[in-house]
Amino acid sequence: MKIPCPLCGARDSREFSYLGHAGLLDRPAPDAGDAAWDDYLHNRDNPAGVTEDLWSHDYGCAAWVVVTRNTATHGILSSRLAKDGAA
Amino acid sequence: MVKLTPTDPCADLLPVEHGHAVLRAVAPTDMWLVAPYNGKAKAAAKAAQKLVGQGWPDPGQGALSDGRGLLFFGHAHALLVGVAPSKDLMKSAAVTDQSDAWAVVDLSGDAARDVLARVTPLDVRPAAFGPGQCARCDIAHMQGAIVCLAPQQFRLMVFRSMAKTLVHDVTVAMESVAALGKTA
């Protein structure tokens, strides 16, 4: 499997490590309340379709990358740098 | 006062030659990791330009001329090679001396790309990786860097503590390619 790094181009998946859903980028404010934090920490959608994940390009440019993929087709649709924020 | 002598981590292990590929040690030289401060990217690029005659490298780019250059070394870093940073550069970027932190070797010969293909998942075909290109990538499961110096010459870098592993893995790859008996 290859993952497209926005800086390095298509690279072998072994160069990356996986963190989780890209929703982790939307961290609630410290005083957002228990419900928001519970949701942030524990609740994940499980879509049959397009979703976004966070990958770290450990063996390459060391950037955090948001990869958009389709869980139904296994297709990788696009990628962008996590530091550039939400889509 | 004690005078410290620079030592090359690969000096006792190299050179190694098998078939149409040679692996040689590279003499230790200045290497500095350069990370521009927030909002100082342009000033850092200008200072680098003065120092090595080239600006900030685009992703995947990096060339050495007369042993000097600035290599793409990560999403927020470049590696300054062959020269110490100027005061100008230090004003606009955080610099870290890495001169003795890396094991550096040169792989060359007509079989160099075949050997490389056995130690890295990087696309090393000539059209994808040519002179002037530089990649941070997996080298035999080590976090390394490869610079294409010439069509059949590559500079490989891994963390200094892994020098023996680098030489071992590249040597095994050289032996395997040589065993195929292909004439280049």
Image: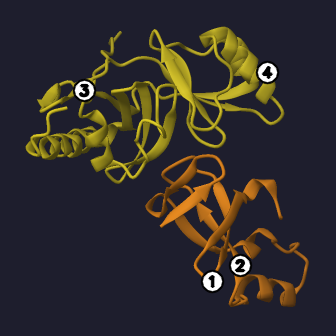
Chain colours: A orange, B yellow
Numbered label attached to residue A55: none
Label 4 element class = helix
Q: Measure the C-alpha gap from mark 4 to mark 2.
A: 39 Å
Label 1 element class = loop
Q: Chain of mark 1?
A: A
Q: Are marks 2 and 3 in contact (CB under 8 Å)?
A: no
Q: Measure the C-alpha gap from mark 4 to mark 3.
A: 39 Å
Q: Name the residue beneath numbered marker 4.
A: B43
Could you tell me the amino acid type at mark 2?
A: Thr
Q: Name the residue beneath numbered marker 2.
A: A51
Q: Are marks 1 and 2 in contact (CB under 8 Å)?
A: yes
Label 2 element class = strand
Q: Are marks 4 and 2 on the same chain?
A: no
Q: Measure the C-alpha gap from mark 1 to mark 4.
A: 44 Å
Q: Measure the C-alpha gap from mark 2 to mark 3.
A: 45 Å
Q: Measure the C-alpha gap from mark 1 to mark 2.
A: 7 Å
Count every numbered label the image shows and give the total.
4
Q: Are marks 1 and 4 in contact (CB under 8 Å)?
A: no
Q: Is residue B9 above or below residue B27?
A: below
Report x, y in % for residue B164: 22, 40
Q: Residues within 10 Å of mark 2 (few under 14, many from 20)?
A: some
Could you tell me the amino acid type at mark 1?
A: Thr
